[in-house]
Amino acid sequence: MTTTEELLASDRRYIWHPFTQAGTAPDPIPVARAYGAVLEDTEGHQHLDMISSWWTTLHGHAQPEIVEAIHRQAQTVEQVIFAGNTHAPAAELSRRLAHILPGGLNRTFFSDNGSTAVEVALKMALQYCQNVGDSGRTRFLAFDGGYHGDTVGAMSAGVSSQFFDPFNDLLFPVDVAPVPPTFDGDTEIEKREQEALARLDTHLEQYGHSTAAAIIEPLVQGAGGMRMHRPEFLRAVAHRLHHHGVLVIFDEVMTGFGRLGEQFACLKAEVTPDLICLSKGLTGGFLPMALTVTQDYIHDAFLGESIDRAFLHGHSFTANPLACAAALASLDLLEGERCTRQRAHIEQQHRDALAELMKEDVVTRPRVYGTLMAFDVELGDDSGGYRSAAGPWLKRFFREKGLLIRPLGNVVYLMPPFGITDDQLATAYDGLREAVRRLPHELT
Ligand SMILES: *Cc1c(COP(=O)(O)O)cnc(C)c1O
């Protein structure tokens, strides 16, 4: 038996954690068990996972149907090279997704995480242009505030997020168009949308013919601060891109699989992209896997006699059968009536709680899409953004309250697993209320 102290000592000595300044960070939570929306630490304390463990845990931790599916699959085929081989879980998953995704999105390329799904989409788009003899299209367009992952291509597409300063010299150039974020009660959004669209028009008139693809997080820019835009805006953007022959890539790594209420943001917005990137919630949060799904006309442009026309890309664990089995079990749950009802129920509770929170002066820009709710905290002279002083104070406060909530700078959001109970949600809302009441006194 390892004691908590031994575990933390090994961690401190041997582990390098992601997105962490180890020089100042508190000890990590030593998680011993996880079930539903609860993380239980080695001392038996419970922490409510209000961010679905970085947006991956879809239904709940240790969801029995998914546990069972992985167990069963592990006894048949656990892993097999996917070049030259195939298997039922991968074929069945691709077939089912083709029926759920909007028309034409029916060719699935497998990889391992959100970043690789994005890399695949960018590479596919560029090679597609070459394969169809349109090799003058070499530019990429991304959107201000977007985040697409931490590998070099994904960083290039997310360059406006400013996480990547040390690596700027590595990144390939990407054009950046504006997105006007909105919130409940925003009266000037149409004007800001018109301005953004006018700037996009100007850009596309000059560079549309030399642009291979545009990548956007549809409806919500996640890591950039849960910035939401309207379906109307997304439709107008996609229409313009298609008019200029630019491929549209939707990065639904966060928004996919029911997070925004509907199964996918593209369905909610009624826009069909040319390529879509999926990951985080795909396996219900059990195993790492990602998909880049595209249309037959893109896939078919890679057919021919020569290997040079093919898409020469792959990863060791492509289409891992265990992950596919988990994804199928997760889809069964997601498509069930209970889950659909539960997502609508969470949305309603978010809206009621947000109305209460809005009574506090520091709470601004309330916004909800499905099971995701967010607001900004605004404190007199705080600069806001990722370096806001409110963020670290809030994170500490929530941790003391047994709530796993990680503000993005001054943006506070909840994205619970769908199986969360009303009581657990109420506990989280109480924590939010206490936090926003105390914040002005603590930080001034
Ligand atoms: C998290 C995220 C990624 C990157 O996914 P990883 O699995 O962390 O590589 C890409 N795009 C979006 C929208 C994301 O939220």
Image (cartoon, helix red, strand yellow):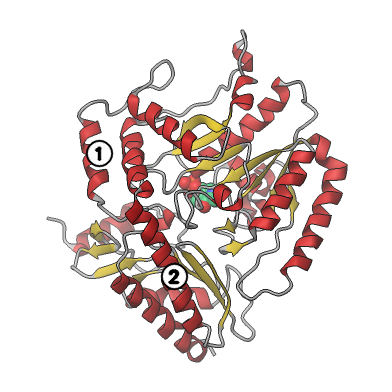
Asked if 3 appears above or below 412 in the picture, the reply is above
Q: Quadrant of the N terminus?
A: bottom left
> Is residue 279 toward the left or the right of residue 157 in the image?
left
x and y percentages locating residue 237 in the rendered image: 73, 50
Marked residue nearer the N-terminal end (1 or 2): 1
The CA distance from mark 1 to mark 2 is: 32 Å
Label 1: element kind: helix
The answer to whether residue 352 of the structure is visible from this angle is: yes
Asked if 88 appears above or below 268 in the picture, the reply is above
Q: Which mark is residue 69?
A: 1
x and y percentages locating residue 33 in the rendered image: 22, 58
Q: Quadrant of the C terminus?
A: bottom right
**At label 1, which amino acid type do we have?**
Ala
Q: Residue furthest top?
A: 305
> Is residue 143 toward the left or the right of residue 370 in the image?
right
Asked if 433 appears above or below 314 in the picture, the reply is below
**At label 2, which amino acid type do we have?**
Gln
> Is the residue marked by circle 1 packed among few (<14), some (14-19), or many (20+) residues within 10 Å?
some
Label 2: element kind: helix
Q: Residue furthest left?
A: 1
Q: Which mark is residue 348?
A: 2
x and y percentages locating residue 22 in the rendered image: 42, 62
x and y percentages locating residue 316 in the rendered image: 41, 28
Q: Which mark is nearer the camera, 1 or 2?
A: 2
Determine the image quadrant of residue 249.
Answer: top right
Q: Residue at x 37, y 49 (%)?
A: 334
